[in-house]
Image (cartoon, rainbow, N blue to C red):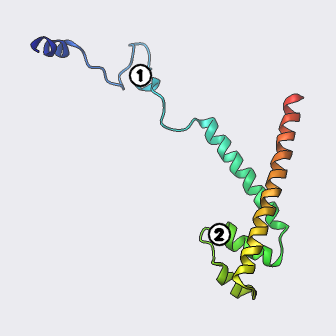
């Protein structure tokens, strides 16, 4: 046991912040993997969000009347309004609001799938050029 203690005391401790060599600024810490997501992944996420936001705005611009109110109040709102409240404003039942919302979700899904497919085709044509 005394031998182990001597071995531990004789080993030098290395700080993760200390330079690896005298003529370099590289440290042990610089070789450890970062806990942050890679920058290219962060940029790709931002770009994808911007594209989807643009697509949502374009889809929203096509809506009118009850569809627009329900889309804004239920699907885009951070704190969605209840179907009963929307129905009261529009003079329809909450069930009718639910039906319109369901139809809007399907239309939005179809729209985004079509738009994304067009983007994939565009990217493929750019890559092949």
In this view, 125 is above or below 64: above
Q: Which mark is residue 27?
A: 1
| Mark 2 crowd level (few <14, some 14–19, many ≥20, 10 Å Cα) | few
User: Residue 18, position in %: x, y?
Assistant: 35, 22
Asked which quadrant contains residue 30, the reply is top left
Q: Residue at x 46, y 23 (%)?
A: 31
Q: Residue at x 78, y 58 (%)?
A: 109
Q: Residue at x 69, y 67 (%)?
A: 75
Left or right: 27, with 119 as reference point: left
Left or right: 26, with 40 as reference point: left
N-terminal of the pair, mark 2 or mark 1, is 1
In this view, 6 is above or below 124: above
Image quarter of the C terminus: top right
- Using the numbered discs, state the Cα–Cα distance from disc 2 to disc 1 in whole angstroms: 48 Å
Numbered disc 1: secondary structure: loop
User: Residue 6, position in %: x, y?
Assistant: 14, 13
Give the camera-side residue of 119 and 22. Answer: 119
Q: Which mark is residue 5?
A: none
Asked which quadrant contains residue 65, the reply is bottom right
Give the camera-side residue of 126 and 87. Answer: 87
Numbered disc 2: secondary structure: loop
In this view, 24 is above or below 97: above
Q: Which mark is residue 77?
A: 2
Q: Residue at x 83, y 70 (%)?
A: 63
């Amino acid at each position: 046991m005394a031998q182990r203690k001597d071995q531990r005391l004789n080993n030098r401790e290395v700080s993760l912040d200390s330079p690896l060599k005298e003529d370099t600024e590289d440290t042990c810490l610089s070789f450890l993997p970062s806990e942050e997501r890679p920058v290219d992944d962060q940029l790709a996420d931002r770009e994808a969000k911007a594209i989807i936001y643009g697509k949502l705005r374009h889809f929203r611009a096509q809506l009118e009347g009850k569809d627009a109110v329900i889309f804004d109040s239920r699907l885009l709102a951070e704190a969605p309004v209840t179907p009963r409240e929307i129905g009261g404003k529009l003079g329809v039942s909450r069930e009718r609001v639910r039906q319109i919302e369901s139809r809007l979700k399907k239309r939005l899904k179809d729209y985004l799938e079509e738009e994304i497919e067009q983007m994939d085709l565009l990217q493929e044509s750019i890559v092949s050029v």
